[in-house]
Structures are given as structure tokens and as C-alpha cells.
Amino acid sequence: MENMEKKIDEAGTLESLEKIRVEIFGKKGMLAAEFAKMKDIPGPEKKAFAEGLNRLKAQLLERFERRHAQLEAEEMQSRMRAEAVDVSLYAPNGVKGALHPVKDTMDRIVDYFTALNFSVESGPMVEDDFHNFEALNLPKNHPARDMQDTFYFSDGTLLRTHTSPVQIRTMMKRKPPIRIIAPGSVFRRDYDLTHTPMFHQVEGLVVDEKAKVSFANLKWILTDFLHEMFGEVDIRFRPSFFPFTEPSAEVDISCIFCGGSGCRVCSRTGWLEVLGCGVVDPNVFEAVGYEDVSGYAFGLGVERFAMLIHHIADLRSLFEGDIRLLEQFR
Ligand code: PHE
């Protein structure tokens, strides 16, 4: 017993303390063994025995927690010492910063489309229901709203869940022809390896007289674009659904990690989904008061592109602000 307290106090690292914790409190630990003896203790003495043991357990636990806090503080201290930055140090010329991989990827995407005469549009991140949903053929209570986990404010406004509202804003302030991309931040309630609550999209929209814009045009431009971004990959257009486009497609590239034979990244399918697109639904044109036009639209996630291009496994690492990530992109 004394022995155990001493052991706790003498643990030199969190790792060794963890071993001691298992030894004492673990399922097969010393306390469990003591409690197991209860069944052999005669009735009248059981209570006292149990109380004694519980007291002992509480004492050990307190001791453990105290030591744990000490060690944690010590390890934090030594880590801070090791990572200390001397801000007074002379920085020789030539030490340059780096573009964040998301910004860099965004620039490459924007450059591709501006070279083809697309202009760059933007819109507010705090949107209203009309621009983010309603005008995009997503009426209230439409089940497709579930595709997007929305952050709402109490006054009914929301953080835009995609860049598609910029389509609506552009069409409402301008007459066709329209040929725009809209890069920007979007927000969804999601957080795991491949999702962060804030991420970036690039939207594209082309609208012109009926004879001038078709699905074939869309297919050509996206195929060329994806080859530009990912090199010699196979590309397939897979029928899909978006309320604001009809027909709609999702576009896959052959997996750049395994070349299409199937691996962990592509979930053994050989394909990676990289964007959504389609021919603008007539209901969208009706909402913005356009007549006798046709159009196509597409939307893509910039982080997804950056992850694929730079082989980044955990999307969240892009937003942790760790300078060591940026140093790899100098
Ligand atoms: N807005 C869609 C999304 O965020 C993407 C998209 C844009 C699909 C334009 C089709 C046309 O998932």
C-alpha cells in the first residue's frame, strides 16, 4: 500500500505513470484483486473491509491525479522549452513565407477559368434562405435540404452551405450572357477526417442563349480542367441529383493513388469524386426572372483538390495553424 503511493510519486513520465495506473486501478490490477477478496470475508466484517478498501482507493486516486497533473505540467514545460522561438534572432534575406495549400490550389483553379474569360464573383457568407435554398429550387421542407447541415442564426439568416447563392446574386444583378466563377468559404456542421465546418468551394456558372450552352460544353470544359489539375487521369460523369440542375452529374477521376486498381483512399472503387455539376434547372431561371436561356453550373471543394494534389491525409491539419505544415509547401 505505502509501496503503491511511493510508486506513484516516483513515476518519472506520464508513460510510466500510466503503467502504474493500470497496475493499481486496472481490471486485473491490485485494487480489483483486493475487492475480489470480499467474497471470502465473513458477513459482519464485510462492511468495514469494504470501507477500508474504498478509502484506500480514494487516497490512491488522489495521489495519482496529483502526480498526473505535475507530470503533465512538466512535460508541457519541457515541450515549450524545446519549441521556443527566439523572436530576436536575425532573419537573413531569402527566408520567405509560403502560400497555404488551400490558397495555392484555389489560385490554380481560378487561373484556369479566368484564362478562359470567366470573371470572378463573390457574395456574402451570411446568407438568407432565399439565395441559399429557395431560389435554387430547394423549397422549405424539401428533403434535399438535409444534404447540407446548415448553421442558422436566430434571425433566420444562415452561413451559406455552398457557393451556389452567388449564381442567384449574379443573375439577379446582371443580364445574360454570364460566365463566372465564384470562389469562397462555405460552412456545414461536419467535423472528421475529410470534413471541417468551414471549407472552400469554387462555383461556376455559364448562361447564354439556348443554342449556345449545352451539357456537351460543360463536359468538355470540366474534362479539360480536370486534366489540367490532375494530369493524365480517366474521367467519368456519373448521373446524380442536385435540385438546381437537371440533368445533374457528379464527376469522378481515376484514383491518383492507385491508378484505378482500388486502394484505401478510393475505398477500393478505383474512382475519386471531385465535383458536382449539371444543366441549370428551369426553376432557377424562373426564380431570377430569366427567359429563353440555358446554362450549366458546377461546384467543387477546394480542400478536396488540395488534399489529392498534395497527398494530405487529414483535412483538419489544413486549419490547425501549425507552421510546420506551411514549411512543407515553401
Ligand atoms: N452546390 C453543390 C454542393 O455544394 C455543388 C454544385 C454546384 C452542383 C453547381 C451542381 C451545380 O454540393
Image (cartoon, rainbow, N blue to C red):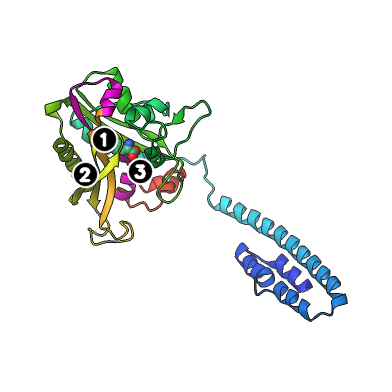
Which stretch is magenta?
283-308
Mark 3 sits near ligand 1, with its Cβ under 8 Å away: no
Q: Amino acid at mark 3?
A: Glu
Tell which residue pokes out farthest to the bottom in this image: 40
Where residue 243 sits: x, y (%)?
31, 36
Ligand 1 image-quadrant field: top left
> Which residue was labeled with disc 3?
303
Q: Amino acid at mark 1?
A: Thr
Where residue 265 sits: x, y (%)?
33, 57
Which residue is at 37% across, 28% downward?
134
Marking on residue 226: 2
> Which residue was labeled with disc 1?
245
Q: Quadrant of residue 282?
A: top left
Viewer-proximal residue, 106 or 71?
A: 106
Q: CA distance from mark 2 to mark 3?
A: 15 Å
Q: Residues within 10 Å of mark 2 (few under 14, many from 20)?
A: many
For marks 2 and 1 on the same chain, the one whose residue lies earlier in the sequence: 2
For marks 1 and 3 on the same chain, the one whose residue lies earlier in the sequence: 1
Tell which residue pokes out farthest to the right in this image: 44
Instruction: Reply above or below: 264 against 288.
Output: below
Direction from residue 196 to residue 287 in the image, left or right = left
For marks 2 and 3 on the same chain, the one whose residue lies earlier in the sequence: 2
Viewer-proximal residue, 110 or 270?
A: 270
